[in-house]
Amino acid sequence: MYKISELVNTGKLLTSDGAWGTYLFKKGLASGSCPEEWNLSHSDEVYEIAKSYIEAGSDIISTNSFGSNLFKLSQYNLQEKLSEICQTSAEISRKAAGEEKYVMASLGPTGKFLIMGDVTSEELYNSFKQQAIAFEKGGANAVCIETFYALDEAEQAISAVKENTSLEVICTFTFDKSEYGFKTLMGISPQQMTESLILCGADIVGANCGSGFEDMIEIVKKIREVSARIPIIIQANAGMPVIENEQLFYSETPDKIKEIVPRLIDAGANIIGGCCGTTPEHIKVIAEIVGKFNQGKK
Ligand SMILES: [Zn+2]
């Protein structure tokens, strides 16, 4: 089996998956409870999410492990279960993906800031290392270090994965549009991110979450200014959420993204999926467009 980045380098476009968080809540996860604990107590529900993305046409699916680091699990007194939670998350997605599709284990930021002295590099590294080893044991192909905003924390995560496993490293940052252009919470531009992550050894870079598919076109162009070759993954939110009748609505419907996805591909994106507010219906639309591009009849 090709590595994901090798497959992209053959010229193939790939579809990843959509939101997990919103989906878990739909399945009954109570707010305030630990989403990753569901890998142990509600593995059938977690499996159904993974399976629904495979059925929608994902080539790569994620895992229910976004907050599976020591710092977040400690808030629920689950730090002792880190390895079990991470390994199980990968096993569940592997079962849904079979041997033909890819599993990229989700690894989110810790919420701790090195620059503030909240935590040491070593403490971050050790948490990421434990997670990565467990993801590999559970059968993941890659780790998706996602929704990051600080270069120093990303550097620890990438090193921890590369030095302790043979998993591929995907790394995505989250950018907001400001008067100074697209920047992360820590003021990092897409160009700065790309330069640094390539130096750290990331195999695939990109952006996730943010303000929607439309804005990602500009971000892809910025990444391509730095590197013509690095595989790019984009997992956009379904637009900016608006609250109506105490419910969250996302403006970029599956129908709306139909005309945006081809432009994202033209800008240079190689792997496309969704983040908050996206559903298997969004993934179906993406997979169809990606399939047409792959057959050369866009
Ligand atoms: Zn998101």
Image (spheres, helix red, strand yellow):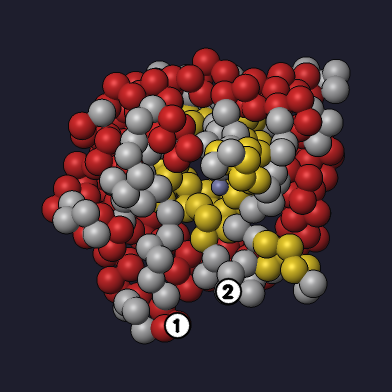
Tell me if 236 is positioned left or right of 47 in this view: right
The residue at the point 35 percent across, 30 percent down is 28
Q: Are marks 2 and 1 in contact (CB under 8 Å)?
A: yes
Residue 54 is situated, as x and y percent measured from the top left of the image, at: 50, 20
Which mark identifies residue 293?
none
Q: Which quadrant of the structure image shows residue 130?
A: bottom left
Say if 190 sits above or below 262 in the image.
below
Tell me if 241 is positioned left or right of 81 in this view: right
Q: Nearer the viewer, residue 218 or 31?
A: 31
Which secondary structure lies at badge 2? loop
| Residue occupied by mark 2 | 186
The residue at the point 81 percent across, 36 percent down is 260
Tell me if 125 is positioned left or right of 15 in this view: left
Which secondary structure lies at badge 1? helix
Q: What amino acid does circle 1 point to?
A: Ile
| Residue occupied by mark 1 | 115
Q: What amino acid does circle 2 point to?
A: Met
Q: Earlier along the polypeptide chain: callout 2 or callout 1?
A: 1
Q: How many residues crowd around disc 1 within 10 Å: few (fewer than 14), some, or many (20 or more)?
A: few
> Can the viewer see residue 249 in this picture?
yes
The residue at the point 71 percent across, 19 percent down is 288
> Can the viewer see residue 62 in this picture?
no
Residue 1 is situated, as x and y percent measured from the top left of the image, at: 48, 26
